[in-house]
Image (cartoon, grey):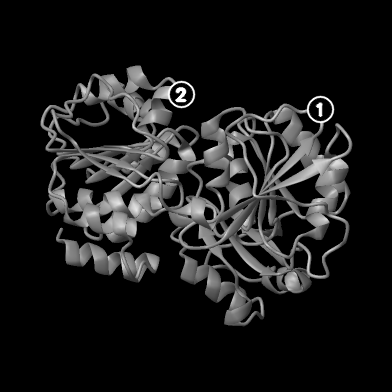
């Protein structure tokens, strides 16, 4: 695939009208060993797509042409969503734990051109002899340092050992140049494209919020009530703390969601979807949500607990001030806490008032128990809620269609009436259940 075609599809499918400096470098390099270092939110996936897709030929159904490995299910889904519409004519599939194995096996016929996967799930398919990667041309290890930190060394080594004809290898990291995995042949002089010192930091303001009490819940309440309308991610250090903070915010009437590793994959995905579509514009999260998630336009990062490492500080803050936007990171600090040297702030803030335009939700989400596998598309859902539910085009919010379900954002004030109107009607000749997500 040529650069012009890739660039046009990035513009048409992802509204990337002008390539940033990093993307331009990846579009022009012909190096076959590339290390890309760039912060979260800088357009890294589009950047490596510009190099990767130029290596691939037309689809012939005889081999997997490229493998992209990433350390989390969320990141796999995000990458696949970027690549799939750009790699038109090439079949792209996503494999990850929690996904239906039978559906994944079916997706291997005809053979896909691009597989995006977590290391564990991809190795599972190889061990079951569901596919062969011996003729694969290209490999991308996205956030390779994170994969190593999470203990995926053995899985990646075993997978790469089966890929004997690699022409292109791309490694990416959001923070630093980590030690190269010894199972990779990166050559003597791989091209290093380093943008870690650029991007979000210059657009990010960090603010310290003193908490008079050791228990910071009341200070968090005051801060959230003082902020103008927008999206906020509240970071804590433990799952139990996430549950406690989330339950408190719900009791106080805040439109909040919850995200941590103890939840099932579908629950975590739904939490991100409801943040993105405005139903729950406040997300309480552990550091699992600090990288690899496709979260739109976060205005505020709130460190309820101080980050435990420089990497955590960097990745949490990377959730805001993305792709040219401005953002603010608030640190709630009690006087008894010891502040790490890697944590800094530009100013202090003492919230004392309630915003007259505070964080609120005017959106509700409808759940439909049919999706891609039932041949339902976004257009089908949009037409359904407009023609049968009485909404205008402007009132229909973000639509997400998964394998066996769909969600659509609608005005909260009209959600009950829309449900009532939809109840007697089929969606694309299919009897469906439509419900309001609480």
Comparing marks 1 and 2, which lies closer to the viewer?
A: 1
Residue 34: % across, % down = 22, 40
Disc 1 element: loop
Is residue 286 positioned above or below 352 on the image? above
Numbered circles on residues, count: 2
Q: Nearer the viewer, residue 436 or 242?
A: 242
Residue 149: % across, % down = 44, 23
Residue 242: % across, % down = 73, 35
Q: Nearer the viewer, residue 132 or 117?
A: 117
Q: Nearer the viewer, residue 130 or 427?
A: 130
| Residue 248 in sight here | yes
> Label 2, on which residue?
150
Horizontal side of 3 relative to 406 (left or right) equals left
Disc 2 element: loop
Could you tell me which quadrant the N terminus lies in? bottom left
Q: Is the C-beta separation of discs 1 and 2 under 8 Å? A: no
Task: State the separation of the CA atoms marked 1 and 2.
Answer: 32 Å
> Label 1, on which residue?
336
Q: Residue at x 14, y 34 (%)?
A: 166
Image quadrant where residue 147 sits: top left
- Dot 1: few (<14), some (14–19), or many (≥20) neighbours within 10 Å? few
Is residue 379 positioned above or below 41 on the image? below
- Nearer the N terminus, badge 1 or badge 2? 2
Is residue 162 positioned above or below 349 on the image? above
Image quadrant where residue 297 sits: bottom right
Image quadrant where residue 339 sits: top right
| Residue 59 in sight here | no
Q: Residue at x 16, y 51 (%)?
A: 29
Horizontal side of 98 relative to 182 (left or right) equals right
């Amino acid at each position: 695939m040529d650069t012009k075609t890739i660039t046009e599809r990035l513009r048409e499918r992802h509204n990337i009208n002008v390539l940033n400096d990093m993307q331009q470098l990846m579009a022009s390099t012909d190096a076959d060993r590339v290390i890309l270092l760039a912060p979260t939110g800088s357009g890294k996936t589009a950047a490596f797509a510009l190099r990767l897709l130029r290596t691939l030929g037309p689809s012939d159904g005889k081999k997997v042409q490229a493998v992209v490995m990433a350390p989390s299910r969320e990141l796999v889904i995000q990458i696949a969503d970027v690549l799939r519409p750009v790699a038109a004519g090439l079949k792209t599939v996503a494999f990850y734990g929690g996904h239906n194995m039978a559906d994944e096996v079916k997706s291997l016929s005809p053979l896909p051109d691009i597989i995006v996967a977590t290391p564990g799930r991809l190795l599972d398919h190889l061990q079951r002899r569901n596919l062969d990667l011996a003729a694969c041309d290209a490999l991308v290890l996205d956030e390779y340092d994170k994969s190593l930190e999470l203990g995926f060394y053995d899985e990646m080594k075993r997978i790469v050992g089966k890929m004997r004809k690699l022409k292109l290898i791309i490694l990416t990291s959001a923070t630093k140049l980590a030690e190269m995995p010894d199972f990779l042949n990166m050559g003597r002089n791989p091209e290093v494209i380093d943008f870690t010192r650029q991007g979000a930091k210059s657009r990010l303001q960090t603010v310290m919020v003193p908490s008079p009490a050791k228990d910071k819940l009341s200070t968090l309440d005051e801060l959230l009530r003082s902020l103008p309308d927008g999206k906020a991610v509240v970071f804590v250090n433990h799952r139990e703390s996430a549950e406690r903070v989330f339950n408190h915010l719900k009791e106080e009437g805040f439109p909040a969601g919850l995200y941590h590793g103890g939840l099932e994959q579908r629950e975590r995905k739904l939490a991100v979807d409801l943040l993105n579509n405005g139903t729950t514009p406040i997300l309480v999260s552990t550091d699992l949500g600090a990288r690899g998630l496709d979260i739109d336009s976060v205005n505020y990062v709130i460190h309820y607990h101080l980050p435990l490492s420089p990497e955590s500080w960097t990745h949490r803050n990377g959730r805001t001030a993305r792709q040219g936007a401005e953002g603010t990171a608030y640190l709630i600090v009690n006087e008894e806490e010891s502040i790490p040297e890697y944590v800094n702030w530009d100013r202090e803030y003492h919230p004392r008032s309630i915003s007259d335009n505070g964080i609120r939700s005017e959106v509700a989400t409808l759940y439909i128990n049919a999706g891609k596998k039932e041949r339902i598309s976004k257009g089908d859902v949009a037409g359904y809620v407009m023609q049968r539910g009485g909404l205008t085009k402007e009132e229909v919010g973000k639509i997400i269609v998964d394998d066996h379900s769909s969600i659509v954002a609608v005005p909260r004030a009209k959600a009950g009436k829309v449900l009532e109107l939809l109840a007697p009607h089929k969606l694309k000749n299919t009897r469906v259940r439509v419900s309001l997500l609480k």
